Image (spheres, helix red, strand yellow):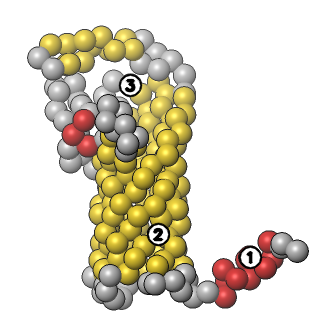
Amino acid sequence: MFSWLRVIALIISVETHALVGIGGYVPFGPSTQKDTTGSKNTFSLDPMLSVNTVIPTGFYNQLFLPEFGYVFHGEGDDGYSKKTMLFLADFGHRLSSTLVLRYGLGTTLTRIGGDGGAVSLRNGGSSSTFYRAGESETSWNTTINFGIETAINPNYAFRFQTYWFSLFDGESRKGSYSFNILYYL
């Protein structure tokens, strides 16, 4: 008989490590414009806070790395608000005592809202009219994640992670990435 109590007891009995991370998230990297002058979003880090855990699997140095992340985008120049939440089900392969290769799947929820209306923004060498959202909408996307994490000391680690949207569709493929400093509790 399947019991949630057995599952919880199994998880609690495994040696786990909880951690929190702070850093920055770049949505869609160089493929999006970050301001009305036409600058690209290559290295515009939006503040990010994450909580996760490390659960050893006992299977060839593999780790299960579930994570929740929240990105603070703030208010856009053209009057919209944006919030992003990341739910990651990553795995990791411990390459050495200080280096972990990360991979897995995630769900990204992005909520965008605004006052409605139109705004003129640069679009290449000219300007175009774009319409702002008049109400809040949430999009759900599945991501394929790849990253690398390295321990600085027993309590701190540094992580670089990529999140690929529509990885196998050349026209729709977009990548986001994050940099985080992690603190092991």
Q: Which residue is mark 2?
A: 91
How many residues crowd around disc 1 within 10 Å: few (fewer than 14), some, or many (20 or more)? few
N-terminal label among 1 and 3: 1
Q: Which mark is residue 180?
A: none
User: What's the amino acid at mark 3?
Assistant: Gly
Q: Residue at x 15, y 20 (%)?
A: 124
Of 96 and 12, which appears nearest the observer? 96
Q: Secondary structure at mark 1?
A: helix
Q: Residue at x 37, y 11 (%)?
A: 118
CA–CA distance between discs 2 and 1? 19 Å
Residue 74, visible in the rendered structure: no
How many residues crowd around disc 2 within 10 Å: few (fewer than 14), some, or many (20 or more)? many
Q: Residue at x 41, y 47 (%)?
A: 72
Q: Looking at the rendering, which quadrant does residue 149 occupy?
A: bottom left
Q: Looking at the rendering, which quadrant does residue 171 occupy?
A: top left
N-terminal label among 3 and 2: 3
Residue 137, percent from left and from top: 54, 29
Of 72 and 179, which appears nearest the observer? 179
Q: Is residue 116 left or right of residue 44?
A: right
Q: Which residue is mark 1?
A: 7
Residue 76, visible in the rendered structure: yes
User: What's the amino acid at mark 1?
Assistant: Val
Residue 76, percent from left and from top: 35, 32
Q: Secondary structure at mark 2?
A: strand
User: What's the amino acid at mark 2?
Assistant: Phe
Q: Secondary structure at mark 3?
A: loop
Q: Which residue is mark 3?
A: 79
Q: Residue at x 33, y 64 (%)?
A: 147
Q: Is residue 59 left or right of residue 125?
A: right
Placement of 156 over or under 68, stated as above or below: below
Of 13 and 46, which appears nearest the observer? 13
